[in-house]
Every structure is written in C-alpha cells, then in structure tokens.
Amino acid sequence: NGQIEVDAHRYLCRVDQMAMARTKITDVVATMRQELRGSFLNQVPLLSRNVINDQDFLRLVGKLRPWTFEQGEKIIVEGEIGDKLFIIERGTCEVIKNINGRPHCVGQLSKGAFFGEIAPLYATARTATVQTTSACTALSLAGSDLLATINDADLEKMRLIARTQVFSSIPLLNSLDSDEKVRIAQALKKQKWRQNAIITGENHITSRLYIVEHGTVLMEAKSKDLLPSFWPIDQEPKIVLGPGGFFGMRGLL
C-alpha cells in the first residue's frame, strides 16, 4: 500500500508538471503571436509607435481580430463602404481594380501586407477589391476600436497623416515629398455644408481644392470635356464622391 501511495503521488506530480509545462508553452505561443501581430501593426504608418504611445499601441494589438478566408474569397470589394483595416497574417491575395469597366490585377499581397488603413478613421468606399489567392488569415481593426482606445490628440495626428495619404491620389500633389504633404495637410481648413448645398458652380471662379472628409458630394458637368482626368472615360458626367474624393484641382493653378 505504501508503494502504491508513493507511485500515485509521483504520478500526480508528473501530471501537475506536464500541466504547468503546457500552460507555459501556451503562454509563450500567445506572447509570440502578440509580438508578431504587434510587428505587423507597427508597419502601418497611421498606427505605428511613432504616432501613438506604447500603452495604446498594445491595446490595439489586443483588439486585432483574426478572420479566415478560403482561396478565391473577397476580403473587401471596390466601391463598398468599409471601416476596417486588414493585415495579412497568413496566405496571399491579389488587388483588383475596375478600369474602364473591366477588372485588372494591379498588385499582389502577402504576409505582413496591409490594406484599407484609412477606413478606421473615415468610413470610405474601397478603392480596390482584395481577393485571396490561397487560404488566408487576415487581422482586422475597426474604427470603433480606435475611438475606444486612442485619445483625441492622437486621433487628430492620425487624421493628419491620413490626409497626406489621400494626396497620393491627387495628381497635382502626389509627387511632393512627405514633409511638403504634411505642411499642406496642416494648412487644410475644415468647412461644413448642409445637405443639398452648392459648394461650387460650374462657372464659379475658385482658388481652392476640396477633399471630402465626411459625407458625400454629387459632382456633375454639362460636358465630358470639363471632367477631371481621374473620371472614367465611359462614365456619364455625374458622379458621387465619398470620403477621400476631391474636386477643384484646377482652382489651385
């Protein structure tokens, strides 16, 4: 009986040791996963440690939500409104844009790549479709996560950086260096209009470029000859601009 009790005690000790070892392994794996996700998030200019403090950064890492997709699934779709940033944790994707009514692959994304980084700040229409080319795991961060975590001062700093990224789609500003873009972003003035208000008329003289930050703007012209260069050539002279859309570029000149 004494030997049985000794063996039973040794067995229970080993079980406890194995349980503790499994817990340590689980903790190590979880820590490594969080550190890896943190390194991914730090690559996003809007959310890097250069913009927000370490405490808020770690909170955001904890709010990253994993999604799994099969090959051929669409993570985001061009034209749809979204409020989530995505980071690829595993797998590959392709970026597809609709050009003159036909889909074209314009890029490839793999582990660590991110897309939709402005969406958490401004619920914007997606500028491209991202579709998986293999089984994929993507991490998302929503606008509500930012608002619940980041203070107003840092949010304003992030919006400033987001505005400079919008400049890359404006032909007159996309060749400027980062410092010049920041100075222009700081010079932007915010104005609000009620629904159905006319911001500028077709024959009005203006010296301003307008960038939509919230809401939508209906832009139309009597002739296609008056349309800006970004306008699809096969589209009628009427378009709805959402956040990130711009007009009045000629006014700066």
Image (spheres, rainbow, N blue to C red):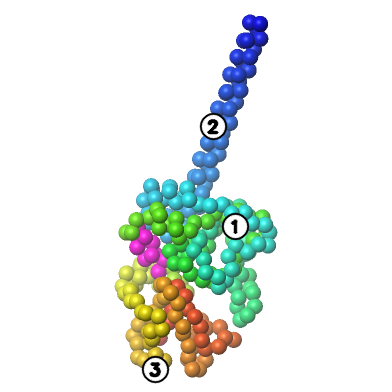
Q: What range of the chain is rendered magenta?
A: 154-164
Dominant SS of magenta comes to helix
Q: Earlier in the sequence, mark 2 or mark 3?
A: 2
Answer few, some or many: residues within 10 Å of disc 2's Cα (few below 14, many 20 plus, some between 14 and 19): few
Q: Which residue is drawn at 52% across and 47% down?
A: 36
Q: Which amino acid does label 3 sit on?
A: Asn
Q: In this view, does 92 lie to the left or right of 114?
A: right
Instruction: Assign a secondary structure to mark 3.
Output: loop
Residue behind mark 2: 24
Q: In which quarter of the image is the C terminus?
A: bottom left
Q: Quadrant of the N terminus?
A: top right
Residue behind mark 3: 203
Residue behind mark 1: 110
Q: What residue type is labelled 2?
A: Lys
- The x and y percentages for residue 200 are 38, 87
Instruction: Assign a secondary structure to mark 2.
Output: helix
Viewer-nearest of labels 2 and 1? 2
How far apart, in angstroms, are the residues tagged by discs 2 and 1?
31 Å
Q: In this view, does 30 lie to the left or right of 51?
A: right
- The x and y percentages for residue 102 are 64, 78
Would residue 174 be seen by someone viewing this image from the given angle?
A: no
- The x and y percentages for residue 81 are 52, 69
